[in-house]
Amino acid sequence: MVIALEARALQCDRCARTDQWKCIEYLGIPGEVYDALIDCKELNWFCSGCREDIPKCNAEKEDKVTGLLEKMLDRLCGLEDRLCQKVDVRVFEELEERVRCLEENVKESVDELKERLTENEEKVAQNEEKVGLGSSVAVRCEEDSDTESRKNNVIMYKVKEIDSDIAEDRKAGDMLFIHELCNYVLKVEVGSGDIEKMFRLGRREQGKERPLLVRFTRSEKKHEVMGKLKELKTASERYRKTSIAHDLTPRQRR
């Protein structure tokens, strides 16, 4: 696999497999988090397979060390029994001192290994926390972008839809309704240049009044319309049943 220099992608820092390159769009990592991972050499990114193997590797290393110590102790005990039978006290004491030094060296090595394993586990936990933080940032950025794209929108409910198979006719009917509602009922001057986009939500079905989404070119015009909704209470039957709401994101609707 060939990865271009300008590609914003990550390779596993453990297995370094060439087929494990992941672009930040696939991982859901924003650009600023990617830049932090590249700039900070102490941060590592692991593929899903390696993240699962790291705890197993640590456990296997601890088991091997424990097994090695048990074998060494068994051999030392056997050696001690044989020495008691074959050597004098002076030689035995010398050997005992050498064994004691060996045990201390082994203990220091084991302690050092455990300390390194603990450091690695902490780094893995920190990396997982930072990746989780990056995902949260990406979700917030996506939510903010969605909110921004909806800020000029309103949704009108119970607006009668013209029964026509021609989309342009239905659109013209909706535009006429909005023009009359805003200008004559709500007393808000709205022209064709004030509306950026307008369309019905959902599939068209016989006898069903689909919600009508209207996007104004300026947020001020939208707020002006929303501030005059009380005028609907005294409007004619054609407009009084209409309700108008902000276009909320799925998270805001919860």
Image (cartoon, grey):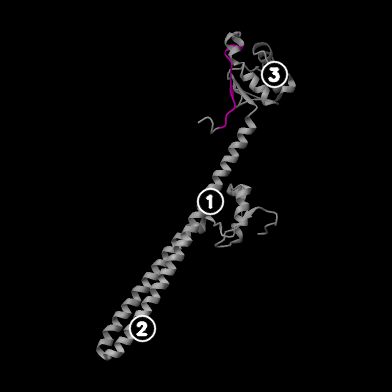
Secondary structure beneath disc 2? helix
- What's the distance in space between the residues labelled 1 and 3, CA to CA? 49 Å
- What's the distance in space between the residues labelled 2 and 3, CA to CA? 97 Å
Mark 1 vs mark 2: which is more N-terminal? 2
The residue tagged 3 is: 175
- Amino acid carrying mark 2 in the image: Arg
Mark 1 vs mark 3: which is more N-terminal? 1
Q: Tell me the tag on residue 130.
A: 1
Q: In this view, does 44 lie above or below 26?
A: below
User: Quick one: label 3, few (<14), some, or many (20+) residues within 10 Å?
Assistant: some
Residue beneath the point at 29% across and 90% down: 90
Q: Is residue 71 above or below residue 14?
A: below
- What's the distance in space between the residues labelled 1 and 2, CA to CA? 48 Å
- Amino acid carrying mark 1 in the image: Lys
Q: Looking at the image, do the residues carrying marks 1 and 2 touch, with CB atoms under 8 Å apart?
A: no
Of 72 and 212, the residue lying toward us: 72
The residue tagged 2 is: 98
Percent x, y of residue 227: 61, 18
